[in-house]
Amino acid sequence: MKHVFMTSVAALTLSSGMALADYSLTILHTNDFHARFEPISKYDSGCSSEDNAEGKCFGGSARLVTAVTEARARSNNSILVDGGDQFQGTLFYTYYKGKLAAEMMNKLGYDGMTVGNHEFDDGPEVLRGFMDAVNFPVVMSNADVSGEELLAGKLQKSAILERGGEKIGLIGLTPEDTDELASPGDNVTFSDPVAAVQGEVDALTAQGVNKIIVLSHSGYSVDKRVAAETTGVDVIVGGHSNTLLSNSLENAEGPYPTMVGSTAIVSAYAYGKFLGELNVTFDDAGVVTAAVGEPLIMDGAVTEDGATVARIAEAAQPLEEIRNKVVAETATEIVGVREECRAMECAMGNLIADAMLARVKSQGIEIAIQNGGGIRASIDAGPVTMGEVLTVLPFQNTLSTFRVTGATVVEALENGVSQIEEGAGRFPQVAGMTFTIDPAAEAGSRISNVMVGGAAIDLAKMYGVVSNNYVRNGGDGYKMFRAAENAYDYGPDLADVTAEFIAQNAPYTPYKDGRISIK
């Protein structure tokens, strides 16, 4: 009996030893923040101080400071990471570029981030300045930066953190088509995400790292592919597609986390509206045995950190004069949500395309094309400020006019709807023309019934087109416009053109007229 008892005690000791070997980690995460340092409205655009005081606003850096502090207090081991696209989106970025983002991310104590496509909007120089200013690694695995002196030796493919005596590997991932989406320059080349991630997993594993997190600014569908086609990835923190994953919210695109094999995928929408909180348990071999959590909504119930409110107010002072100028009035809300503007005719797309065409019609321009991804917010009813217009159109794009054949116009439309199932930003909002989409058809043969000015498009005829300089120079896959004739890319700012058009038609009434049909 004594011998049996001793065996049982040994077994208990062994099993409790195994339990002690489990390692828990809280992964706090954000993505696609887009310079929303101040609170946002339910439309993801600016929110007045009055509405904020009444608890009607969301997000803002001051709420995140409080929420991150509270979340860290709940956890024995935690990290705070970002899935990319801190840059671009409000006047704060227009004025400060990456400086304020770096300051706020350092204040929040981030442990790592990946490079989003918008981190390249102002070229490698601004990204390098941001990287020099932050106190954490910025990583990107699927690009060769060796030929870009500003990034070579600085922008690493992966990094290793230590928490609670354990090593954690962070691997960065950015869209493979970033050269089409932003301005990385000619010296940076991008590559397939699966091969890049696997290469870094293997390198980290060889260094004894068995807990690996991919910070992926590549979209939910790519994240699922990376999870399925690689080995050794434990968690993917997503970005780029602004995907909300949740177990309780009705508009979520999937569960939080979404499990693909043993890999947990998380994403927390965008604009600081949520703070992701994933609690992961690893066994001694680094295998995930549990992954549970939920994005925390940054609503009025989250107290704003006073010092951060004061700092953001100070940073906002130079912007106030530009922002508060009332430029027009709208009768009802102008809807500019990505769910519409990247998939179908949307009221904001009609407004912007109409404004572009109206400005240059006298120059013999017949067609306007605006990429849906360039439309970043809605505008609520009532007075419209320049700040609101700049939140919708923050990229400082200029009007571009050019001439291409009808065949090239159709090719452009096919490009625009080629990634409709992914909610890609290349979706075309138009004026001066109508067309039909068949989303079930193969990409490249989805467009039909193209009419220009009420007549069927002539594939051989030259048409005058207006777009923005980003699209005209091949952004969002519109490479067919690079060889256009009579191209002029230095027209007025698109935000100014749109603001003036609303003012000329005040009070502006948003509308849809069936210019884009879906089979």
Image: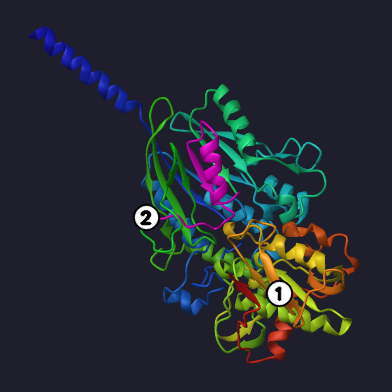
**Residue carrying label 2:** 247
Neighbor class of circle 1 (other Cα within 10 Å; few <14, some 14-19, many 20+) is many
Q: Nearer the viewer, mark 1 or mark 2?
A: 1
In the image, residue 500 lies in the stretch drawn in magenta: no
Residue 318 vs residue 423, the one in the foreground: 423
Magenta part of the chain: 218-246
**Residue at the image point whose x is 54% and y is 69% from the top:** 44
Q: In the figure, residue 392 lies in which quadrant?
A: bottom right
Q: In the figure, residue 92 lies in which quadrant?
A: bottom right
**Residue carrying label 1:** 430
Q: Quadrant of the N terminus?
A: top left
> Which secondary structure, mark 1?
strand
Looking at the picture, does residue 344 appear above or below residue 193?
below
- Judge left or right: residue 217 versus residue 408: left
Neighbor class of circle 2 (other Cα within 10 Å; few <14, some 14-19, many 20+) is some
**Residue at the image point whose x is 58% and y is 75% from the top:** 378
Looking at the picture, does residue 343 appear above or below residue 241?
below
Residue 24 vs residue 38, the one in the foreground: 24
- Judge left or right: residue 462 versus residue 298: right
**Residue at the image point whose x is 70% and y is 82% from the top:** 499
Residue 230 vs residue 407, the one in the foreground: 407
Give the color scheme: rainbow, by chain, secondary structure or one colour. Answer: rainbow
| Alpha-carbon span between mark 1 and mark 2 | 37 Å
User: Looking at numbered disc 2 in the image, what kind of residue is underneath it?
Assistant: Asn
Question: In the image, residue 237 lies at what x, y percent?
Answer: 52, 46
Question: In the image, residue 304 lies at what x, y percent?
Answer: 45, 64
- Judge left or right: residue 1 versus residue 439: left
Along the polypeptide, which appears first: circle 1 or circle 2? Answer: 2
Q: Quadrant of the C terminus?
A: bottom right
